[in-house]
Amino acid sequence: MASDSDKTGNAVEIDRLALVLAKEPGSKAFLPLAEEYGKAGMWEEAAAVLEDGLKTYPSFITAMVALGRTYDQMNQPVKAKAILEEAVKLSPENLRAHRTLAKIYVAQGAKDAALRSCNVIIAVNPQDQEALSLRATLGAPVSSAPVEAPRPIRTRQPGKPIREAVAPPLETAQSNTTAAEAAVFDAEEQPETVSRSPHGDLVPITSTVASPSDEHKGAVVTQLEQWLTSIQARRRDRKHPSESRLPTS
């Protein structure tokens, strides 16, 4: 129960807001004034202020919901239901409107409508105990926990840029991790096929993975001999440059 000091403070605030509204009849000061009337239990005064204010602001959702709740406090469910249903048409996820509507629907035996309002509340706030309790009394089955959407992960394939992919289920992801990583490392650790000589010449090297045929080996040996002969000739030219310029007979 409110103390005398609270009542006095409430009365002072009502007088102040009433004066503000009297000076600015077209302002939205009617809403806080109606709220103060409601705190004082003056529901008829609150309803009158809200009705007048909604004539100027007919689509003011907060005021519509406040009026519906005020009608509910005044035991006028028909009026409360009408204004609150109009409010949820404009604001489908208004929890305060659905909370009052659910109670009205239950009282009127409109089970399906009450469940719809409860479901809207729970969809926005899954831990709303009031809506969960009311939903349970209506005999609704307990829904399972929502499934979390798969998170994107980054994957890489040999020779291709990193791309986005959808994470597989946990049981398959664990079994595929080793194989995927092995494929990446195998691709990155392939042995080189050429190297450079001390003089900067490219020289093919033998792969430790593949097993070349005898014919291929012979071709490689022949090419190596040709490169070595060319290298030796250039070395000889560098050591005896005058010999390379001797006239031929």
Image (tube, rainbow, N blue to C red):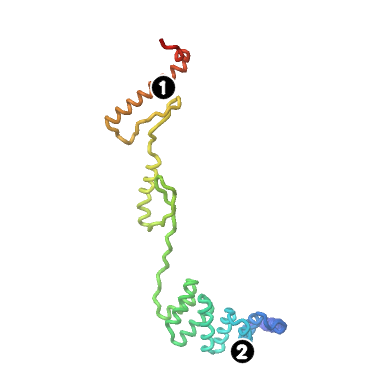
Assign a secondary structure to mark 2: helix
* Residue at the outermost left position: 214
Q: Residues within 10 Å of mark 1 (few under 14, many from 20)?
A: some
Residue at point 42%, 68% (across, down): 145
Residue type at mark 1: give it: Ile
Q: Position of residue 56 (x, y in %)?
A: 63, 83
Q: Tell whether 63 sits left or right of 153.
A: right
Say which of 81 and 91 sits in front: 91
The answer to whether any part of residue 74 appears in the image is yes
Q: In which quarter of the image is the N terminus?
A: bottom right
- The Cα atoms of the two marked residues, 2 and 1, are separated by 109 Å
Q: Which amino acid does label 2 sit on?
A: Glu
Residue at numbered disc 1:
231
- Image side of residue 62 versus residue 147, left or right: right
Secondary structure, mark 1, is helix
Residue with the mark numbered 2: 44
Residue plotted at (48% across, 81% down): 102
Front label number (2 vs 1): 1
